[in-house]
Amino acid sequence: MRDAVRTVVVGFLAGALSVLVFHQLGFWLSSKLLNATFTLYNMRPVPPWGVPTIVSLAFWGGLWGVLAAFVVPRLPGALSGVLGWILFAAIVVTLVNWFVVLPIKGQAAGNGFRLPGVVVVPIVYGIWGFGMWVFTRLLRTTLNWR
């Protein structure tokens, strides 16, 4: 039980912190490289509770981090390390976002698969996945939780 609680804590913190650092960095890099417009650290309220968008993103990133913290280390071979974290975020989270979350919000699946989003989102999520791996390692080392 103790290991499960540690995995939840580390996964949530890694996912949330990675949203605040790596996810936003990914969108910033995309805006510079593609001359696209992305609102970083967006404070626009999100219904139904009116929390700022960045807080909502960090919360959901934390929940994805918990799932990844349980799944990725159990993957075979090289997928149990940094590659697994990157691919989990870039593929699994992107597909769930496109085909579950957006339709629930009344938007087209994949947001219509328009450029640059169809390319940018998986790359940014992959960067976020890398950040989760970084924060997971840092947190486990700092807290001496192996």
Image (spheres, rainbow, N blue to C red):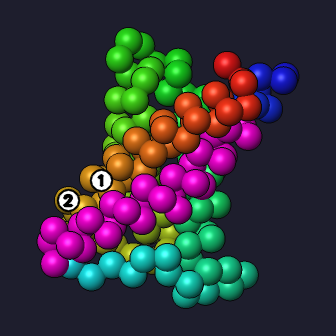
Is residue 95 at all visible to an observer of this figure? no
Q: Amino acid at mark 2?
A: Val
Query: Which residue lies under the disc numbered 1?
Result: 122
Is residue 130 at all visible to an observer of this figure? yes
- Image-based side of 85 in relation to 2, left or right: left
Above or below: residue 26 compared with residue 132: below
The residue at the point 38 percent across, 22 percent down is 79
Above or below: residue 139 compared with residue 61: above
Q: Nearest the camera: 48 or 51?
A: 51
Q: Nearest the camera: 39 or 87?
A: 39
Q: Is residue 16 magenta?
A: yes
Q: Amino acid at mark 1?
A: Pro
Distance CA(mark 2)–CA(mark 1): 6 Å
Which stretch is magenta?
8-35
Q: Main secondary structure of the magenta part?
A: helix
Dot 2 and dot 1 residues touching (CB under 8 Å): yes
Query: Which residue lies under the disc numbered 2?
Result: 119
- Residue 6: which numbered mark, if any? none
Q: Residue furthest right?
A: 1
Q: Position of residue 1 (x, y in %)?
A: 84, 22
- Image-based side of 146 in relation to 131, left or right: right
Secondary element type, mark 2:
helix
Q: Residue furthest top?
A: 77
Quadrant of the image containing the C terminus: top right
- Image-based side of 52 in relation to 38, left or right: right
Q: Position of residue 64 (x, y in %)?
A: 56, 47
Above or below: residue 56 compared with residue 13: below
